[in-house]
Image (tube, helix red, strand yellow):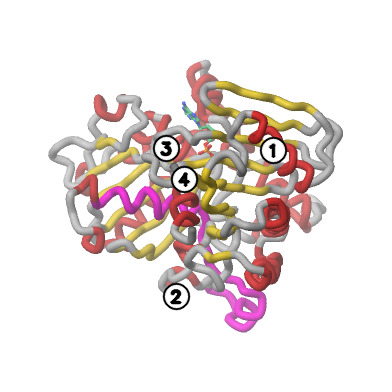
Amino acid sequence: MSYVLVINSGSSSIKFQIVDPQAGATDDPMVSGLVEQIGEDNGRLTVKYDGKKVVKQQPIKDHTAGLKLSIDQLERIGMGPTQVDLIAVGHRVVHGGMVFSAPELINDQVVEMIRDLIPLAPLHNPANIDGIDVARELLPNLPHVAVFDTGFFRDLPPAAALYAINAEVAAANQVRRYGFHGTSHEFISQQVPELLGAPANEVNQITLHLGNGASASAIHGGQPIDTTMGLTPLAGLAMGTRCGDIDPGIIFHLARQADMSIDEIDNLLNKQSGVKGLSGVNDFRQLRELIDAGNEDAWLAYNVYIHALRRFIGAYMVALGRVDAISFTAGVGENDTNVRYDALAGLEMYGIEIDEERNQIRSDEPRLISTDNSRVKVFVVPTNEELAIARKAAAFA
Ligand code: AMP
């Protein structure tokens, strides 16, 4: 069997998995690992395989040390690069700008092109490049492939991609809608035609990726025509800790009235807002506990979240004209029956009828949760971004 090492390198963490690219969407990876607190004294490596878990606590100086430690540990459990048939390394890269749509075989020039996009993703792309550099150094004989979170949305129609701001300023600063979570929206949207038994180019659908970050997209015959995230992943739906769409004037107001710096506002809107900003918690399980205990802030936060979701579902129904399917995915979308019900309740007039019993079924499999009469079919489709990246990388092996 052949495997792909999938790497998602963050500023102080590296997530990795060894994945069989032929596996099913709900199969567990052979190994998954997480290096945390890189650069801190309390570094930690966690490796999970075969129902077992190894945790190593030690200072991890940098990404090189983190990946070396991970590879050592993989060798120790018999799953290192010299022990399993690794055919490629897939790297998640957050921002591909207008340069990258498809996955790209990495060479020095591609790394430079990703580096040129740092102004668009100043926190993410440098960390992604660190992961790429270290992995290429440690595993020089394998093809390394970059898979871009923005790639799926690279060719949004101009009317959806352009912001109504001064065109010269926008062009000079690469300001436009790029969209994120593309790997997930693509992965689940590709399964829907099969579930419907219809040709992919005839299916119009709305995909709802509701995790800690959340985004929706409208897909017309396989081609995305709109998505909620924008230049950055801050836009669109209300999320776990991000505000989603707000009046941009709020930023000037806070700068002037509250004397907040740009960095403080950035932190507020990205990390202290969304459901967490309104209720104190960003995990929907905790939010539900608070709601059940009668906490009014939690109830309000939930309603703000649902309101934003329904607003975009409505917008995308109009944008698509005819909708064949709506799918839920990611942590909240796959697990929270209340969110799914409340997002689509009362829309019978628009051909949407949730089946309350089907909606309650817990499963790892893609499943229908609308009634047999519902003209728009509603699905839960588990996402698996690592598998999607592994499949794309394997194509270069
Ligand atoms: P993700 O970003 O896709 O990993 O999603 C993480 C989020 O999913 C968590 O912050 C929770 O809000 C949510 N989540 C995970 N499991 C459940 C569950 N069983 N019920 C409700 N929400 C869940």
Mark 4 is on which residue type? Ser
Magenta residues? 164-193
- Mark 3 and mark 4 in contact? Answer it, CB < 8 Å: no
Q: Which residue is mark 4?
A: 2
Which sits earlier in the primary sequence, circle 2 or circle 4? 4
**Vertical position of residue 202 compared to residue 274: above or below:** below
Q: Which residue is mark 1?
A: 70
Secondary element under disc 2, as helix, strand or loop, is helix
Disc 2 residue: CB within 8 Å of ligand 1 = no
> Tag 3: residue type?
Gly
- Residue 197 position within the rendered picture, expressed as x and y whole percent measured from the top left: 17, 49
Check contact, mark 2 vs mark 3: CB within 8 A.
no
Can you name the residue that lies furthest to the front here?
Answer: 82
Say which label, 3 or 4, has the lower sequence index: 4
Helix, strand or loop for disc 3: helix
Q: CA distance from mark 1 to mark 3?
A: 31 Å
Asked if labels 4 and 2 touch by Cβ distance under 8 angstroms, the answer is: no
Numbered disc in front, either 1 or 3: 1
Viewer-proximal residue among 300 and 337? 337
Numbered badge on residue 333: 3
Res 122 quadrant in image: bottom right
Q: Is mark 3 within 8 Å of ligand 1?
A: yes
Q: Amino acid at mark 2?
A: Pro
> Where is the N terminus found, in terms of image quarters?
top left
What residue sits 35% from the left and 40% below the top? 381
Kindly report which numbered mark, 2 or 4, lies closer to the viewer in this rendering.
4
Can residue 182 be seen?
no
Q: Which residue is mark 2?
A: 158
Residue type beneath disc 1: Ser
Q: Residue at x 33, y 38 (%)?
A: 380
